[in-house]
């Protein structure tokens, strides 16, 4: 497994619900956490490792020692959104590119964890932003799709570099 980088078409494959949660899923999740921390990320969605399912892993602290903040989010459903806030986002599939993205400030979300237990919670601010970014990946919406025209112009060279590296690989 490796983190796939834009414009890899695996980022745009339709995602299927995860079922059942078996040893294969658990092994992939462990590997995703490893890759996320290796790249200093706070979230990683299954399509970013070429696995086309509705699952992502997060740790809003970004600290591998802070296991209490790790969440495995399986088959998530956003239930409610409130407020708006603009903040900077990066993406492990767009290395070196950071853009301001408007997101809901609060989200009510439902999901299943790695033990198969259902959850429903309200998240706000940073964790809510991470949720919305990772959920976008499951819907095949990428950072480049969230960019304004000005962002795309500002990052045109970096995006061209990524496309060229992908063609050459
Ligand atoms: Zn991302």
Image: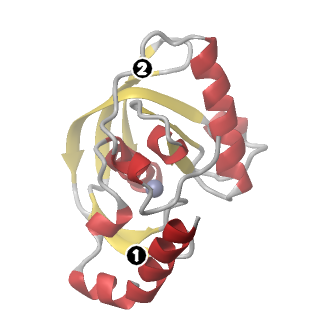
Q: Residue furthest front?
A: 168
Tag 2, which secondary structure?
loop
Q: In which quarter of the image is the C terminus?
A: bottom right
Look at mark 2 in the image and give the residue it sits on.
18
Separation of residues labelled 1 and 2 (CA atoms): 30 Å
Front position in the image: 142 or 118? 142
Front position in the image: 34 or 61? 34
Residue 128 in view: no
Front position in the image: 50 or 109? 50
Nearer the camera: disc 1 or disc 2: 2
Is residue 157 depicted above or below 44 in this figure? below
How packed is label 2: few (under 14 Cα within 10 Å), some, or many (20 or more)?
some
How packed is label 1: few (under 14 Cα within 10 Å), some, or many (20 or more)?
many
Query: In the picture provided, is 63 more to the left or to the right than 164?
Result: right
Query: CB of mark 1 within 8 Å of CB of mark 2?
Result: no
Look at mark 1 in the image and give the residue it sits on.
99
- Residue for point 32% across, 83% down: 151
Looking at marks 1 and 2 on the same chain, the residue that comes earlier in the sequence is marked by 2
Query: In the picture provided, is 35 more to the left or to the right than 84?
Result: right
Residue 107 in view: yes
Tag 1, which secondary structure?
strand
Q: Position of residue 116 (x, y in %)?
A: 49, 11
Q: Position of residue 31 (x, y in %)?
A: 68, 35
Is residue 105 depicted above or below 86 in this figure? above
């Amino acid at each position: 497994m490796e983190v796939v980088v834009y414009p890899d078409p695996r980022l745009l494959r339709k995602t299927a619900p995860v079922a059942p949660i078996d040893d294969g899923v658990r092994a992939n999740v462990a590997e995703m956490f490893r890759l996320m921390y290796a790249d200093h990320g706070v979230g990683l969605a299954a399509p970013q490792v070429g696995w086309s399912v509705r699952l992502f892993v997060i740790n809003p602290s970004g600290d591998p020692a802070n296991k209490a903040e790790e969440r495995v989010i399986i088959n998530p459903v956003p239930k409610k959104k409130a407020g708006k806030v603009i903040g900077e986002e990066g993406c492990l599939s767009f290395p070196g590119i950071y853009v301001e993205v408007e997101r809901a400030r609060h989200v009510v979300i439902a999901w299943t964890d790695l033990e198969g237990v259902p959850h429903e919670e309200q998240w706000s601010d940073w964790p809510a932003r991470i949720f919305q970014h990772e959920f976008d990946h499951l819907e095949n919406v990428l950072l480049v799709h969230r960019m304004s025209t000005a962002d795309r112009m500002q990052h045109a060279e970096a995006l061209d570099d990524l496309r060229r590296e992908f063609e050459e690989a």
